[in-house]
Amino acid sequence: MSDAKTRIEDTVKANDVVLYMKGTKTMPQCGFSSRVAGVLNYMGVDYHDVNVLDDEQVRQGIKDYSDWPTIPQLYVKGEFVGGCDIITEMTLSGELDQLFESNGVTYDKDAAEKIREANA
């Protein structure tokens, strides 16, 4: 499992935004992964996706790494942010915008606002 932990650490540190998910950003394989990828895609965030279905060690390893039991998992600048429910709440409250801005992550502010308007 240490090999998986090393790969996870390297990936999280090498990319500003990383989404560990079931499937890929262009073809999510579960509803929760689809929701988070959809938010990031719509907001134009440049992120690295990791398909946990491709590697059982990474699938379990990411849960151990974050001490979080579910997938998807979003990381920004090496820090675990949360899963689907947390990302949804942060998107709707504007906290995700603030997190991206404070970390220098480029995103489409108008798209973020449209998500909030559509869910008001």
Image (cartoon, rainbow, N blue to C red):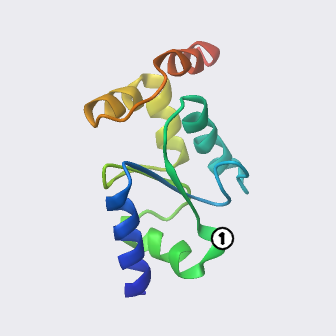
Q: Position of residue 7 (x, y in %)?
A: 41, 75
Snapshot quadrant of residue 51? bottom right
Check disc 1: other Cα within 10 Å, few if <14, some if 14-19, many if 20+.
some
Q: Position of residue 20 (x, y in %)?
A: 52, 59
Image height of 51 relative to 73, above or below? below
Q: Nearer the viewer, residue 50 or 62?
A: 50
As helix, strand or loop, the secondary structure at mark 1 comes to helix
Snapshot quadrant of residue 40? top right
Snapshot quadrant of residue 114? top right
Amino acid carrying mark 1 in the image: Leu
Q: Residue at x 43, y 24 (%)?
A: 93
Q: Nearer the viewer, residue 23 or 10?
A: 10
Instruction: For the N terminus, give its image quadrant.
Output: bottom left
Image height of 61 relative to 17, above or below? below
Q: Is residue 41 left or right of residue 19?
A: right
Residue assigned mark 1: 53
Q: Nearer the viewer, residue 6 or 31?
A: 6
Q: Position of residue 72 (x, y in %)?
A: 55, 55
Q: Residue at x 43, y 49 (%)?
A: 82
Image height of 84 relative to 91, above or below? below
Q: Is residue 32 left or right of residue 105?
A: right
